[in-house]
Image (cartoon, grey):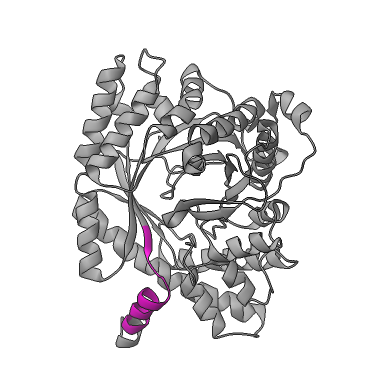
Amino acid sequence: MINQKDILSTINMIEQQHLDIRTVTMGISLLSCCNEDAKTACENIYDKICRYAERLVPECEDIETEFGIPIVNKRISVTPMALVAGASKTDDYVTFAVAMDRAAKSCGVNFIGGYSALVQKGMTEADKKLILSIPEALASTEYVCSSINVGSTRAGINMDAVALMGRIIKETSEKTADRDGIGCAKLVVFCNAVEDNPFMAGAFHGTGEAESVINVGVSGPGVVHSALKEVSGQPFDVVAETVKKTAFRVTRMGQLVAIEASRRLDTPFGIVDLSLAPTPAVGDSVARILEEMGLETCGTHGTTAALALLNDAVKKGGVMASSSVGGLSGAFIPVSEDEGMIAAARKGTLCIDKLEAMTCVCSVGLDMIAIPGDTPASTISAIIADEAAIGMVNSKTTAVRILPAPGKGVGDTIEMGGLLGSAPVMPVHPESSEAFIARGGRIPAPLQSLKN
């Protein structure tokens, strides 16, 4: 039963500790929009998105007003566009991105995800056309986000796709060089991508999903940080229990908003993604949580262990609060979007190698990391391959969202603003991976894939 203490506590979390609903994302299937004629298909895409999502923003704003809970982003995810565009006789896939962008603008959402292809075992002609169109598509649209799945535990890693994505990321950066390469902030490369992720840039509406669905992503690093201050110096089992209880409360709020949005929009409720999603604001940082556990600076020895505890406790608390937990669910470590991560990177304590180790025990992977603009495409591909290998072997979702900074080097900063924040340019290893990436082919699936 809810009592006055619980209500006041929740109000305090919202007003003082940056608690919010990070996103309400409506997933929409576009399979019914396929058409041999690309122009007709694009009209179908625009019409269907607008028909399903026209009330998304106003209904979410009403929920914010009625419940007093901030909903930072309203988003749309759609069927991987390579599956839809593949039915059309055209080589110009950018027109599909433009149709998505027009629909997003008409609906008033912050982002639309799903300019995507799933190529973990091989590429169809449609997949390849879409991937090759990504730089132009992201440069010529404002709201569109793109994701490519290059590996899975069941399929292994498609190294031809990995090699191609290194070049695509470089080209995307160059195409948006006038905006510090911001196109790359809307492009993520996955291993074991999930079908119900509400977070950008990786959201898409999987083929196993319903015609439309409401997925909600919560936040709350500031709430967890504040809770841990109250158990300063106490043993780790107390720390874990504190995080679990806090994650429970945060997830219950997400469940409340998800059910209400589902009811008002007459759309099935999908999942609550209980990821701790930071922002550049002071007091809303995952890095500061780790430092509250006793680390002088995030990235020093002990960081991976602290993050493992945090990620596990968040999941344990969240699954008790909702029977429909999904998406990525854990702790995000996007450098540019986390005030504490930015500070640690500038100090030199946090490096890409340490971030890679941290991704073994948390959600997603190498996220929003700026690297020198002259980094070779083969080095970017090798970074993707390393991260995909972690995901493949550990049966978890991993990803790379990396930002080659046009014309900039180590020590410089790129500025993207808003939730995307700013990122110090971090060094990469100068030794070449060219011959490794040039081999191509497929890294076979690991033994643990044989579970049938």
378 sits left or right of 248 in the view:
right
Q: Position of residue 217 (x, y in %)?
A: 40, 57
Q: Is residue 235 magenta?
A: no
Residue nearer the viewer, 292 or 180: 180
Residue 450 visible in the current orientation = no
Range of residues picked out in magenta: 7-22
427 sits left or right of 175 in the view:
right
Check the image and name the residue furthest to the right: 431
Residue 255 visible in the current orientation = yes
Residue nearer the viewer, 241 or 162: 162
Residue at image location 54% in from the left, 86% down from the top: 230
Assign the N terminus to one quadrant of the image.
bottom left
90 sits left or right of 306 in the view:
left
Q: Is residue 5 above or below residue 383?
A: below
Q: Is residue 13 magenta?
A: yes
Q: Position of residue 248 (x, y in %)?
A: 45, 71
Q: Position of residue 143 (x, y in %)?
A: 36, 41
Residue nearer the viewer, 228 or 243: 228
